[in-house]
Every structure is written in structure tokens, then in C-alpha cells.
Image (cartoon, coloured by chain):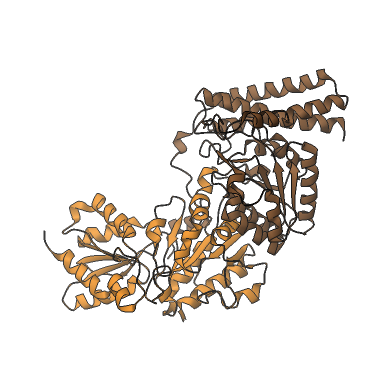
Chain colours: A orange, B brown
Amino acid sequence: MRTLTYREALYEALLEEMEADPRVILIGEDFVGGGAFGVAGDLPDRFGADRVIRTPISENSYVGLAVGAAMTGLRPVVEIMFMDFVTLAMDQLVNHAAKIHYMYAGQYRVPLVLRTPAGAGRGYGASHSQSLEGWLIQVPGLKVVAPSDPADAKGLLKAAIRDDNPVVFIENKLLYPKKGDVPDGLDTVPIGRARVHRPGQDITIITYGRMVDLAVEAADILAREDVFCEVIDLRTLKPLDIETIFGSVRRTGRVVFVEEGTGGIGAEVCARIAENCLAHLKGRPTRVAAGDVPIPSAGPLEQRVIPQVSDIINGCIDSLQVE
Amino acid sequence: MTRAEFIEYYRRMLTIRYCEEQIGLLFARNLTMGTAHLSIGQEACAVGVLAAARPDDYVVSTHRGHGHLLAKGASPARLIAEICGRATGFCRGKGGSQHIAVGEINFLGTNGITGGGIPIATGAALSVKIRGTDQVVICFFGDGAANQGTFHESLNMAAVWKLPVVYVCENNGYAMYTRSTDVTSVADIAVRAGAYGIPGLKVDGMDLLAVRDAAAEAIDRARLGLGPTLLELETYRLCGHSKSDPGKYRPKDEVAKWTARDPVATWRRRLLVEGLAEVELARVEAEVKAEIEAATEFALQSPYAEDEALEGTYAPTRLDAAMKAGAR
């Protein structure tokens, strides 16, 4: 067992997969210095220009470039510098990468990973702070993962690279310096499997990414008041590990969904809980999400828009109300 | 050129012409799915370019891609079946006219998004370069796509990395119903190659041999590692944009001028001049006609694959098995 940062864990996954499989290549902007958040580290020097493709600022076309490379035998890992810029590449991601396997009846596969830093908290403002995963889970053919700690970051990235489908890999940018234990020789963490991060019998808090730490903090505070929350880290947003969610909700009868975006993932999960677990619910499903505004730049404003520990506690108190 | 080559090119162009006409008839009888963008009038572009390519070269196509498929060697029967939505189609009816790939002949797909295939072709060329094969990628698109960002972004990248790709712009004068010259900054799209430091050439797209020879030079250049070329083939669709378009926005004298340059009829006259006998040409015409009729029969007798409608979104992955076995 070693302690690594989230950034180091991602780097190790890239390094190990590139060493193991010559088909794995990196594509993205600004790899000088390892990319905008330094994840690629020295990989450009280690593997050279044939394996690390330094692109111009042409997001839609270099995602398309990765689609073409993936269809013809390579396994590209594309980096989009900020998740906001995925909007520039939506045509290639949504109309091409996601659909090719189905619409060409399985004749071509698109083993592509699109890594992208998401989320607020650094004052970057409206065009550099969004969490757009709520859109992406609506797209048939994509897989979407969002690890919350270094071990999952490493294991899920390795799984994403070995997956034969396009995987959007969301890295919350505040998590890069986060430290955590990573088992020696960790291989893959399976896509599509949630984790019960902390057991509890009163409320199920479902979340992912950076919000997992905030949810655990809220659960610690509530435990002092004898309210015991189960925290589920989804890890994969599409396909959802719906059985783990249902199993927990059927035990606790109460659900709070926490996300940093404006609510799309929670909408889907809560709707499915309502459809499948209604008889077990003791209160209404509660959602804690960003306000319906663009992300402001100033710290005090940003904090009002993005869920805080206090918002999660309030959400849990709401969920305890008997209708 | 040998007699056999002359005849073979005629057969290929005729296959496209008859197949497209047949698809038009099937559309009129409401037997096709969705719309269909026919390439009647543009046959010399598809046949000319692909006559210069190798069977293992990749092709990326457009919404108007039936001709490219046939010129690459795709079976008319399976093409018509796909357009009619049948299980025997190349994509089992899941794709339809604008989304047809044929893996076994390295045909990476017709494409319903204008300009959508250009970066994919560029990526296939990157892959060729990295994998170290000596294949070339042929990337077809229209004059409309030359105004998409993907065109400019992709040509730039291909030029920077000297990728083995030939960009073939079939300029038929109209981006859907809009005259290209009304919405394009330059008279000749080929000059845009200069902005990316690559060769650009304008070619008469109704002249099969001119197209073939220009393509051969560009393909050789790509195969030798000298980088991409932009070819602009000046052509015309002798039909509407799609089957819902009677093409009334085009002046009659313009249509008449291009109809007189019909590449199939032109080639036929050429063959007679070259000394081929009328009876020989009539035999080819009868054979192709019979092939398209049989293809249509095959397509219309094929079932739909409705039981597969909800299957195949994801490719099965090695990891799925590990997951079921209960890994971490």
C-alpha cells in the first residue's frame, strides 16, 4: 500500500497502460509540462511524439481525430483541458463516438477515453468551472465515470482505457492534490460498480466525485446527533449501479442525492428510486445540487452556488421530515 | 489504358447510376427509410478517385455516399437493403443511408453530419502513421463542409503532422439549396489548401480520367509520407439535394449545361470513339441493370431486424466478464 495523490494515481494508470499496450496513445493540448493540471507529467518525453500527440486548440477535431484512430486499431486517451470545452467537441463525442458501435451494427468499436477536469472552487468563473455530466448520461453509447479518490482514479482509468467503448472520465480539479492509499499492483476498478463508502441505517446519501468528501463530513456531524447516514459513492454515472442504490434505499427509506452540477444525475437517480422503491420510502427524495445559475468567479459567490457541507446537512434534515 | 479498364470504369459508373435511380424509385414507392441523397451526376468523382486507391485504403464519406460505397466495392444488394432498413443491410437497418460503414472493405462510414467525417479521416491517417502501415485515407466531403470548422481544423493538423490523407471536396455548387458561391469566401475551394501549406488542385469532376490521375498523384504523395493534398472536384448533382427536393432553385440553363456533361453519357461516347462496339456497351448495361434488379429483389425480400433494436449500444468488453465474476 502506498500513499499517492489523485494526480499521481492518474499518472500511474496512464504510464502502466501505455507501457503494457502500444496501442494506447495520448491526444490533447499543452502536454508541455504534462497538460493543464500536470497529470501527464513526463509521459511526452518518455513516449515521444508518436504516442503523445500534441494538438492545436481544435477540440472538436481532435476528439474526431481520436474517434478515427480508435476505429482503426488504436486506444486513444484524449484530454480536454476543462470540461466546459467538451461543448466544443459535442458533435464528435455525441454524434460519432457514442453512436458508431450501434449504428454500424458492431462493425467498428470506439475504445476512446475522454479525460476532463470538471467542477468549481478555484474562481475560474462561468466558462471553466462547470460539471456537465448531467447531459452526458443522456447519451446512449457513452460511459461516464467520476472517481473520488486516488485508488479509484487509478483503477477506473485503467478500466476505462481497456474498455472497448467511449468513456468520459471526469476528474474534479480540486481533487488533484488529494492523497489516499493505493494498493500495490492495483489493477482495474470495474466500471459500473458503486461503493458503499460508509454504512448507516437512517439516510442514504448518494453522491460521487468531490462531493463524497463533503458528504462524509456531513455524515460525521450528523452521527453526533445520532443520525447515521450511509454514503454511496457512485463512481460510475453511466451505467448506474442501480442495485446497490436500491438495496441501500430499501433499508434506510430515505435518500439525499448530492452533486456539484445543476441536478441532472440526481434527477435520474431519484426518478428511478421513485419508480422502484416507493413502498420503502419514508420521506421524499431530496436533492442537493448547484443553483440554477452560471458559476460565478468570486469565492463567496461560488460557495453560495455550489453545495457545501451545511447544504448536505440541511438536505438530510429535510429528508427526515415526516410528510 | 486497356479495353478492360475502359469497360470496367463504365460498369462502375453505371452501377452507381442505376443503383441511385433504383433508390429514387424505391423512395417514390415509400420503400426506403428516411431520405436519400443521390449522387447522380457525380459518378466520375467516386469512380475516378477510388480507381486510384488500393483496396486496403480507408474511405470516409458523407451524407451523399452511395456512390463512394459502390466504387469501393460494396455490394449493391446490401446497400439497397440498408437503405430499405432490412436485416441484410450493411448495418442491419440500424444505420440507414447516411450511416453506412463496411468494415471488410475499410469503409469507415457515410456520415449524416456535414463535415463530421473530416476529423475521423484525419484520425485514421494518424493511426496509419503510428501503426506504420502504408495505407492512405480518402476523405470525401462537399462544398458545404468546406465551411465547417472541422475542415479547417483537420487540414491544419494533417499538414502539421504530414498525415497520409487525401481530402476530396466534391463541389457540386450547392450546399443543400444554397448556392455555394453565395456563402463561400473564395471562388475555388482548392485555394484554401494554401492556407495550410499543402497542395490544392481543382479538377474537372465530370472527367473520369482527370479525376483518377489527380487522385493517383495525391495518393502517391500521401503514401510516400509527403502529407495531405486537397482536391476540389468540380461536379454537379443531376438531381435534387434529397428526395424531398425537386431542385427548383437552380436555373434551367445551368442544369442543361451540366446535363450535357453527364459523366456516364460522356464516358459512353468516349468508349465508342475508342472503338468499343455498341453491342458490347449494351451488354454491360443489361448486366448492370439485371444486377440492380436482383439486388432490389434481394433487399425487398429481406426481413427487418426489429428484435435487435435495443441491442448493441455498447461493445462487449473483456472487463464485463471480470465484473460478473465479482472483482473489486
Picture layout, residue B37 above or below residue B135: above
Which one is in front, A244 or B101? B101
Which one is in front, A224 or B125? B125
Query: Which residue is situated farthest in the left direction here?
Result: A323
Q: Is residue A295 visible?
A: yes
Which one is in front, A99 or B206? B206
Instruction: Tell me which residue sits at (58%, 32%) in the image.
Output: B240
Task: Please count the marks in the image.
Answer: 0
Left or right: A317, with B304 as reference point: left
**Residue B154 pos. (x, y %):** 63, 57
Q: Is residue A188 visible?
A: no
Instruction: Tell me which residue sits at (73%, 22%) in the image.
Output: B285
Query: Which residue is situated farthest in the top direction here?
Result: B279
Instruction: Tell me which residue sits at (80%, 38%) in the image.
Output: B209
**Residue A50 pos. (x, y %):** 67, 67
Which of the image's four quarters has the C terminus of chain A?
bottom left
Which quarter of the picture shows residue A78?
bottom right
**Residue A39 pos. (x, y %):** 52, 75
Picture layout, residue A66 above or below residue A31: above
**Residue B153 pos. (x, y %):** 61, 59
Which quarter of the picture shows residue A296?
bottom left
Left or right: A257, with A67 as reference point: left
Picture layout, residue A183 above or below residue A76: below
